[in-house]
Image: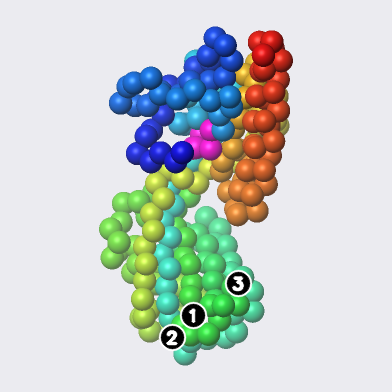
Amino acid sequence: TVRTGWPAAGLAREPGGGWRLTPAGGGDGVVADAVVLACPAPAAAALLAGAAPAAARAVATVRYASVALVTFAYDPAAVPGPLDATGFLVPRVEGLVLTACSWASSKWAHLGDGPVLLRASAGRVGDERAVAMDDDRLVDALAADLARTMGITGPPLEVRVSRWPSSFPQYEPGHLDRVAAVEANLAATAPGLVLAGAGQRGLGLPACVRQGTAAAAAALAGARAADVQVGT
């Protein structure tokens, strides 16, 4: 059963085993043998606070930055030189609004015919300029940065703005050790309760697949362990 528009507000262990999730609007909620929390770290920490307080405190330390993406379509004649890589990163010291550019039409063969597609990123910890800009100002700023860094001439044919507030986790030194400690704590104290998501072990598509597979295996193992503990 897929439920949308049903934000979970509470998570508690059931006396007979399993976990109860209660919705924000109140009500009985649902009971499950296992729960995978694949949500941003602040939301996961809030749900874990009562069920696994030590894990909740560790998860709550993950910081996030806001990111805005603008996808540009350019006439190939406006882009000088061969795009013979996948893109580039822009260090903070350059002072640009642009933080990275992904050359989509070079990365993906099926996009190679037609306009040149560039995905420009803006936003990082300590730099909220992109958040403060409206869409038009953001497009103009990133187009100017692309002209400066890539020598692009002329306006884009099409643009699309996508904003992701507080969505880019920052992996600080020791992050993977903290994640491993949280996973060990949950396995020992809250079997059947599993974490996954960008705030844990990566945000790219390969990381999503890898974490989804691992979370499913951990959820099954935890549910079986809980059954043994309650004697079912």
The residue at 56%/33% (across/down) is 36
* C-alpha span from label 3 to label 1: 11 Å
Please tell me whether mark 1 sits on a helix, a strand or a loop: strand
* C-alpha span from label 2 to label 3: 17 Å
Instruction: Give the percent coordinates (x, y) of residue 203.
Output: 58, 48
The residue at 54%/67% (across/down) is 102
Q: Residues within 10 Å of mark 2 (few under 14, many from 20)?
A: some
Q: Quadrant of residue 122?
A: bottom left
Instruction: Give the percent coordinates (x, y) of residue 62.
Output: 54, 34
Instruction: Look at mark 3 in the image and give the residue it sits on.
Output: 107
Is 202 above or below relative to 53? below
* C-alpha span from label 1 to label 2: 6 Å
- 90 or 187: nearer the viewer: 187
Is 85 above or below relative to 97? below
- Residue 117 located left or right of residue 155: right
Mark 2 or mark 3, which has the lower sequence index? 2
- At label 3, the amino acid type is Lys
Mark 3 or mark 1, which has the lower sequence index? 3
- Residue 206 located left or right of residue 119: right
The residue at 50%/59% (across/down) is 99
- At label 1, the amino acid type is Val
**Segment tinted magenta in the rendering:** 37-41
Instruction: Look at mark 1 in the image and give the residue it sits on.
Output: 116
Q: Of helix, strand and loop, which mostly describes the magenta segment? A: loop
